[in-house]
Amino acid sequence: MANTRGLAPAVALIVLFAATWLEARPSQEQTSPPAAQGTALPQRIRVSQRVEEGLIAKKVQPQYPQQAREQHIQGMVVLKAQISKEGDVIQLELVSGHPMLVPAAIEAVKQWKYKPFLLNGQPLVVETQIAVTFTLALPEDAKGEPNPSGVVGDVPGGTPCGQTGAASGAVLARNADGPQRVRLSTDAAQGLIATKIQPEYPDLARKARIQGTVCLKSEISKDGDVAEVHLISGHPALAQAAIDAVKQWKYKPYLLDGRAVEVETLVTVNFTLAGN
Protein backbone atom coordinates (compact mmCIF):
# COMPACT_ATOMS: atom_id res chain seq x y z
CA MET A 1 0.00 0.00 0.00
CA ALA A 2 2.86 2.32 0.76
CA ASN A 3 4.33 1.74 -2.68
CA THR A 4 1.02 2.48 -4.34
CA ARG A 5 0.60 5.72 -2.46
CA GLY A 6 4.11 6.69 -3.54
CA LEU A 7 3.37 6.17 -7.21
CA ALA A 8 0.24 8.32 -7.25
CA PRO A 9 2.01 11.68 -7.27
CA ALA A 10 4.31 10.52 -10.06
CA VAL A 11 1.41 9.32 -12.27
CA ALA A 12 -0.45 12.57 -11.71
CA LEU A 13 2.65 14.52 -12.71
CA ILE A 14 3.00 12.51 -15.95
CA VAL A 15 -0.68 13.04 -16.88
CA LEU A 16 -0.41 16.77 -16.21
CA PHE A 17 2.72 17.03 -18.40
CA ALA A 18 1.06 15.14 -21.26
CA ALA A 19 -2.04 17.34 -21.18
CA THR A 20 0.09 20.48 -21.15
CA TRP A 21 2.14 19.23 -24.15
CA LEU A 22 -0.96 18.34 -26.19
CA GLU A 23 -2.54 21.74 -25.52
CA ALA A 24 0.60 23.58 -26.56
CA ARG A 25 1.07 21.51 -29.78
CA PRO A 26 -0.13 23.42 -32.88
CA SER A 27 -3.01 21.85 -34.83
CA GLN A 28 -2.70 20.65 -38.42
CA GLU A 29 -4.69 23.67 -39.65
CA GLN A 30 -2.40 26.07 -37.78
CA THR A 31 0.68 24.60 -39.42
CA SER A 32 -0.81 24.98 -42.96
CA PRO A 33 0.84 27.68 -45.05
CA PRO A 34 -1.08 30.99 -45.24
CA ALA A 35 -1.68 30.59 -48.99
CA ALA A 36 -3.81 27.51 -48.35
CA GLN A 37 -6.18 29.50 -46.16
CA GLY A 38 -6.92 32.17 -48.81
CA THR A 39 -9.13 31.94 -51.91
CA ALA A 40 -7.43 29.95 -54.67
CA LEU A 41 -6.80 31.81 -57.93
CA PRO A 42 -8.62 30.53 -61.04
CA GLN A 43 -6.61 28.40 -63.45
CA ARG A 44 -8.09 30.19 -66.46
CA ILE A 45 -9.79 33.55 -66.99
CA ARG A 46 -11.91 34.91 -69.83
CA VAL A 47 -10.77 38.31 -71.12
CA SER A 48 -12.47 40.59 -73.64
CA GLN A 49 -10.88 41.02 -77.05
CA ARG A 50 -10.21 44.72 -76.44
CA VAL A 51 -8.36 44.09 -73.16
CA GLU A 52 -6.27 41.26 -74.60
CA GLU A 53 -5.34 43.30 -77.68
CA GLY A 54 -3.52 45.68 -75.35
CA LEU A 55 -1.22 42.80 -74.33
CA ILE A 56 -0.13 41.83 -77.85
CA ALA A 57 3.66 41.86 -78.05
CA LYS A 58 3.98 40.39 -81.56
CA LYS A 59 1.32 40.29 -84.29
CA VAL A 60 1.87 38.42 -87.56
CA GLN A 61 -0.30 39.56 -90.47
CA PRO A 62 -1.98 36.75 -92.45
CA GLN A 63 -1.11 35.98 -96.05
CA TYR A 64 -4.11 36.72 -98.28
CA PRO A 65 -5.02 33.40 -99.98
CA GLN A 66 -4.50 33.69 -103.73
CA GLN A 67 -7.75 31.93 -104.60
CA ALA A 68 -9.72 34.21 -102.28
CA ARG A 69 -7.98 37.24 -103.80
CA GLU A 70 -8.83 36.14 -107.34
CA GLN A 71 -12.48 35.67 -106.38
CA HIS A 72 -12.56 39.02 -104.52
CA ILE A 73 -13.51 37.32 -101.24
CA GLN A 74 -13.27 39.58 -98.21
CA GLY A 75 -14.51 39.37 -94.66
CA MET A 76 -13.72 38.67 -91.03
CA VAL A 77 -12.55 35.46 -89.39
CA VAL A 78 -13.39 35.15 -85.68
CA LEU A 79 -11.39 32.71 -83.55
CA LYS A 80 -11.64 31.55 -79.96
CA ALA A 81 -8.11 31.52 -78.53
CA GLN A 82 -6.46 30.10 -75.47
CA ILE A 83 -3.25 31.82 -74.38
CA SER A 84 -0.75 30.29 -71.97
CA LYS A 85 0.66 31.89 -68.83
CA GLU A 86 3.75 32.76 -70.87
CA GLY A 87 1.69 34.51 -73.56
CA ASP A 88 1.82 31.84 -76.27
CA VAL A 89 -1.25 30.93 -78.35
CA ILE A 90 -1.78 27.27 -77.41
CA GLN A 91 -5.25 26.58 -78.86
CA LEU A 92 -7.51 28.05 -81.56
CA GLU A 93 -11.12 27.23 -82.44
CA LEU A 94 -13.12 28.64 -85.35
CA VAL A 95 -16.16 30.75 -84.45
CA SER A 96 -17.02 32.14 -87.89
CA GLY A 97 -15.45 33.07 -91.22
CA HIS A 98 -15.23 32.24 -94.92
CA PRO A 99 -13.63 28.79 -95.51
CA MET A 100 -11.10 30.26 -97.95
CA LEU A 101 -9.87 32.75 -95.34
CA VAL A 102 -9.88 30.61 -92.19
CA PRO A 103 -6.57 28.65 -92.67
CA ALA A 104 -4.58 31.84 -93.30
CA ALA A 105 -6.05 33.49 -90.21
CA ILE A 106 -5.27 30.50 -87.99
CA GLU A 107 -1.73 30.17 -89.32
CA ALA A 108 -1.01 33.84 -88.58
CA VAL A 109 -2.58 33.97 -85.09
CA LYS A 110 -0.66 30.85 -84.01
CA GLN A 111 2.49 32.98 -84.27
CA TRP A 112 1.19 35.84 -82.12
CA LYS A 113 2.84 36.54 -78.80
CA TYR A 114 1.24 38.20 -75.76
CA LYS A 115 2.49 39.67 -72.52
CA PRO A 116 1.41 37.47 -69.58
CA PHE A 117 -1.97 38.36 -68.08
CA LEU A 118 -1.44 38.97 -64.36
CA LEU A 119 -4.02 38.64 -61.60
CA ASN A 120 -2.81 39.52 -58.11
CA GLY A 121 0.70 39.38 -59.54
CA GLN A 122 0.34 35.83 -60.86
CA PRO A 123 0.12 34.91 -64.60
CA LEU A 124 -3.00 33.07 -65.74
CA VAL A 125 -4.15 31.13 -68.79
CA VAL A 126 -6.45 33.39 -70.84
CA GLU A 127 -9.44 32.62 -73.05
CA THR A 128 -10.45 35.34 -75.53
CA GLN A 129 -11.73 36.00 -79.05
CA ILE A 130 -9.63 37.25 -81.94
CA ALA A 131 -10.94 38.86 -85.13
CA VAL A 132 -8.86 38.85 -88.32
CA THR A 133 -10.13 41.04 -91.17
CA PHE A 134 -9.29 40.41 -94.82
CA THR A 135 -9.75 43.47 -97.06
CA LEU A 136 -8.66 43.79 -100.68
CA ALA A 137 -6.90 46.97 -101.73
CA LEU A 138 -8.76 49.46 -103.92
CA PRO A 139 -8.04 49.51 -107.67
CA GLU A 140 -5.26 51.77 -108.89
CA ASP A 141 -7.71 54.42 -110.13
CA ALA A 142 -9.40 54.54 -106.72
CA LYS A 143 -6.33 54.72 -104.49
CA GLY A 144 -6.27 57.65 -102.14
CA GLU A 145 -10.06 57.72 -101.92
CA PRO A 146 -11.89 56.82 -98.72
CA ASN A 147 -13.69 53.47 -98.74
CA PRO A 148 -17.01 54.04 -100.52
CA SER A 149 -20.19 53.40 -98.58
CA GLY A 150 -23.90 53.93 -98.82
CA VAL A 151 -25.21 57.11 -97.24
CA VAL A 152 -28.83 57.33 -96.18
CA GLY A 153 -30.67 60.57 -96.82
CA ASP A 154 -33.04 62.51 -99.02
CA VAL A 155 -32.38 63.20 -102.67
CA PRO A 156 -30.67 66.64 -102.77
CA GLY A 157 -32.89 69.40 -104.09
CA GLY A 158 -35.97 67.24 -104.57
CA THR A 159 -38.76 65.30 -102.91
CA PRO A 160 -37.49 61.89 -101.76
CA CYS A 161 -38.58 58.97 -103.96
CA GLY A 162 -41.10 61.19 -105.71
CA GLN A 163 -43.11 61.50 -102.50
CA THR A 164 -45.70 64.24 -102.87
CA GLY A 165 -48.07 65.53 -100.27
CA ALA A 166 -47.79 62.55 -97.91
CA ALA A 167 -48.87 63.97 -94.59
CA SER A 168 -47.15 62.78 -91.45
CA GLY A 169 -49.52 60.48 -89.59
CA ALA A 170 -52.04 60.06 -92.41
CA VAL A 171 -54.27 57.08 -91.58
CA LEU A 172 -54.27 54.34 -94.23
CA ALA A 173 -56.63 51.86 -92.59
CA ARG A 174 -59.02 52.06 -89.68
CA ASN A 175 -61.40 49.73 -87.89
CA ALA A 176 -63.67 49.97 -84.87
CA ASP A 177 -60.76 49.53 -82.48
CA GLY A 178 -58.69 52.32 -84.04
CA PRO A 179 -56.20 52.74 -86.92
CA GLN A 180 -54.23 49.71 -88.11
CA ARG A 181 -51.57 51.56 -90.09
CA VAL A 182 -50.48 55.12 -90.77
CA ARG A 183 -48.30 56.67 -93.45
CA LEU A 184 -45.43 58.81 -92.23
CA SER A 185 -43.33 61.23 -94.21
CA THR A 186 -39.67 60.32 -94.64
CA ASP A 187 -38.58 63.07 -92.24
CA ALA A 188 -41.05 61.99 -89.54
CA ALA A 189 -40.03 58.33 -89.82
CA GLN A 190 -36.33 59.20 -89.67
CA GLY A 191 -36.95 60.78 -86.29
CA LEU A 192 -38.08 57.38 -84.98
CA ILE A 193 -34.99 55.45 -86.09
CA ALA A 194 -33.30 53.76 -83.12
CA THR A 195 -30.77 51.63 -85.04
CA LYS A 196 -29.57 52.43 -88.57
CA ILE A 197 -27.36 49.98 -90.47
CA GLN A 198 -25.32 51.54 -93.28
CA PRO A 199 -25.32 49.49 -96.51
CA GLU A 200 -22.17 47.97 -97.94
CA TYR A 201 -21.24 49.36 -101.33
CA PRO A 202 -21.49 46.40 -103.78
CA ASP A 203 -18.08 45.52 -105.16
CA LEU A 204 -19.29 45.26 -108.77
CA ALA A 205 -21.04 48.62 -108.55
CA ARG A 206 -17.92 50.23 -107.08
CA LYS A 207 -15.68 48.87 -109.82
CA ALA A 208 -18.14 50.01 -112.48
CA ARG A 209 -18.36 53.44 -110.77
CA ILE A 210 -22.15 53.07 -110.39
CA GLN A 211 -23.78 55.65 -108.11
CA GLY A 212 -27.31 56.75 -107.41
CA THR A 213 -30.34 56.67 -105.13
CA VAL A 214 -32.41 53.64 -104.20
CA CYS A 215 -36.01 54.39 -103.15
CA LEU A 216 -37.80 51.87 -100.93
CA LYS A 217 -41.21 51.53 -99.36
CA SER A 218 -40.85 50.22 -95.82
CA GLU A 219 -43.53 48.70 -93.61
CA ILE A 220 -42.77 48.89 -89.89
CA SER A 221 -44.46 46.79 -87.20
CA LYS A 222 -45.98 48.09 -83.96
CA ASP A 223 -42.77 47.03 -82.20
CA GLY A 224 -40.57 49.05 -84.56
CA ASP A 225 -39.22 46.15 -86.65
CA VAL A 226 -39.01 46.46 -90.43
CA ALA A 227 -41.56 43.88 -91.55
CA GLU A 228 -41.36 44.40 -95.33
CA VAL A 229 -39.27 46.36 -97.81
CA HIS A 230 -40.34 46.96 -101.42
CA LEU A 231 -38.21 48.46 -104.18
CA ILE A 232 -39.67 51.57 -105.84
CA SER A 233 -36.69 52.67 -107.93
CA GLY A 234 -32.92 52.41 -108.11
CA HIS A 235 -30.07 50.82 -110.03
CA PRO A 236 -30.24 46.99 -109.91
CA ALA A 237 -26.57 46.83 -108.84
CA LEU A 238 -27.37 48.93 -105.74
CA ALA A 239 -30.91 47.87 -104.83
CA GLN A 240 -30.19 44.64 -102.93
CA ALA A 241 -27.52 46.23 -100.73
CA ALA A 242 -29.98 48.97 -99.78
CA ILE A 243 -32.74 46.46 -99.01
CA ASP A 244 -30.45 44.25 -96.90
CA ALA A 245 -29.40 47.24 -94.80
CA VAL A 246 -32.87 48.71 -94.26
CA LYS A 247 -34.26 45.33 -93.20
CA GLN A 248 -31.97 45.52 -90.16
CA TRP A 249 -33.14 48.98 -89.05
CA LYS A 250 -35.00 49.36 -85.79
CA TYR A 251 -37.57 52.07 -85.05
CA LYS A 252 -39.21 53.37 -81.90
CA PRO A 253 -42.91 52.44 -81.88
CA TYR A 254 -45.16 55.11 -83.41
CA LEU A 255 -47.97 56.04 -81.03
CA LEU A 256 -51.32 57.35 -82.21
CA ASP A 257 -53.80 58.28 -79.48
CA GLY A 258 -51.47 56.50 -77.05
CA ARG A 259 -51.48 53.21 -78.98
CA ALA A 260 -48.68 51.72 -81.09
CA VAL A 261 -49.63 51.32 -84.76
CA GLU A 262 -47.99 49.96 -87.90
CA VAL A 263 -46.23 52.47 -90.13
CA GLU A 264 -45.68 52.79 -93.86
CA THR A 265 -42.98 55.16 -95.08
CA LEU A 266 -40.49 55.81 -97.87
CA VAL A 267 -36.75 55.43 -97.42
CA THR A 268 -33.98 56.76 -99.65
CA VAL A 269 -30.50 55.30 -99.73
CA ASN A 270 -27.84 57.29 -101.60
CA PHE A 271 -24.74 55.56 -102.93
CA THR A 272 -21.91 58.00 -103.69
CA LEU A 273 -18.28 57.23 -104.53
CA ALA A 274 -15.63 59.49 -103.03
CA GLY A 275 -13.99 62.01 -105.32
CA ASN A 276 -17.09 62.74 -107.33
Image (spheres, rainbow, N blue to C red):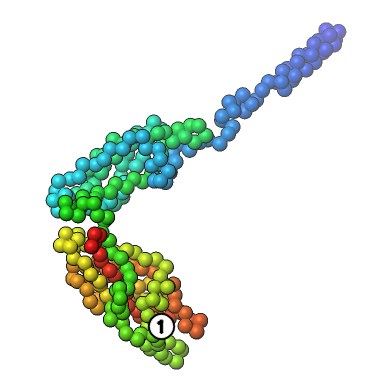
Under tag 1, what secondary structure? loop
Give the residue displayed 24% in from the left and 49% down from the top. Answer: 134
The C terminus lies in which quarter of the figure?
bottom left
- The image quarter in which residue 31 lies: top right
The residue nearer to you, when weighing 223 against 150, is 150
**Which x, y percent locates residue 45?**
44, 41
For the residue pair 78 and 75, the one nearer the viewer reads as 75
Task: State the residue in front, 44 or 6.
Answer: 44
| Horizontal and vertical percent position of residue 138 | 20, 52
In this picture, residue 170 sits left or right of residue 242: right
Q: Around disc 1, counting alpha carbons within 10 Å, would you say few (fewer than 14), some (14 to 19), or many (20 or more)?
A: some
Using the image, determine if residue 234 lies above or below residue 115: below
Q: Can I make out residue 2 in this image?
A: yes
> Which quadrant does the N terminus fall into?
top right
* Percent of width and height locating residue 167: 39, 85
Q: Is residue 229 visible?
A: no
What residue is rendered at 24% in x and 39% in y?
107
The image position of residue 195, as x and y in percent, is: 39, 66
- Residue 263 appears left or right of 139: right
Residue in the picture at 21% in, 42% down: 63
Q: Is residue 119 above or below residue 154?
A: above
Q: Amino acid at mark 1?
A: Ser
| Total numbered circles | 1
**Which image quadrant is residue 93 in?**
top left
Q: Which residue is mark 1?
A: 168
Query: Residue 234's image quarter?
Result: bottom left
Which residue is situated farthest in the bottom direction here? 176
Q: Is residue 193 left or right of residue 112?
A: right
